[in-house]
Amino acid sequence: MRHTLVHNLRLDGYFVLEACDGAEALRIVIGQSRPIHVLLTDVSVHGTTLAEGLKPYRPEMRPLFFTGDTKNLLAQVRQILEPPQQ
């Protein structure tokens, strides 16, 4: 599911960072100089804990929690993000 979402967001022109687990997400967040607007995370894999752990590094970053139900996920992401400038 993550790969499909990342692929579709990149096709739409968004800059996407992806991590396979919380430790990698923390390394990416700390090392990234660009703004990170949204954290997409699965509630079932400790997503709330991840969001709270990243908050001190990126207080402006908004978490979007989801589950295996992908039907409306991309639409929800687009509602939060501004369209990419092209």
Image: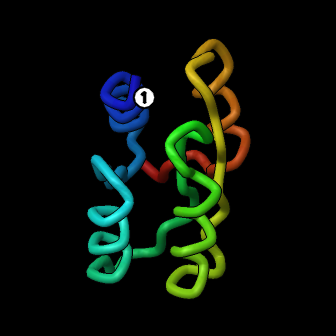
- How was the colour assigned to the protein in this rendering? rainbow
Please give the count of numbered marks on the rendered protein. 1
Q: Residue at x 42, y 28 (%)?
A: 5
Which percent across, then down, holds residue 25? 35, 63
Is 56 on the left or on the right of 16, as rendered? right
Tell which of 46 and 82 is nearer to you: 46
Q: Is residue 35 above or below residue 24?
A: below
Is 81 on the left or on the right of 30, as rendered? right
Is 61 on the left or on the right of 14, as rendered? right
- Mark 1 nearby-residue class (10 Å; few <14, some 14–19, many ≥20): some
Residue indicated by mark 1? 5
Which percent across, then down, holds residue 16? 36, 50
Q: Is residue 75 above or below residue 55?
A: above
Q: Residue at x 65, y 76 (%)?
A: 60
Is 27 on the left or on the right of 15, as rendered? left
Hey, which residue is sitting farthest bottom in the picture? 56
Which percent across, then down, holds residue 13? 39, 41
Q: Is residue 73 above or below residue 19?
A: above
Say which quadrant the N terminus sits in: top left
Q: Residue at x 33, y 52 (%)?
A: 21
Which percent across, then down, holds residue 23? 31, 66
Q: Amino acid at mark 1?
A: Leu
Hey, which residue is sitting farthest top in the picture? 71
Q: Residue at x 60, y 78 (%)?
A: 55
Tell which of 43 and 14 is nearer to you: 43
Tell which of 10 and 41 is nearer to you: 41
Secondary structure beneath label 1: helix
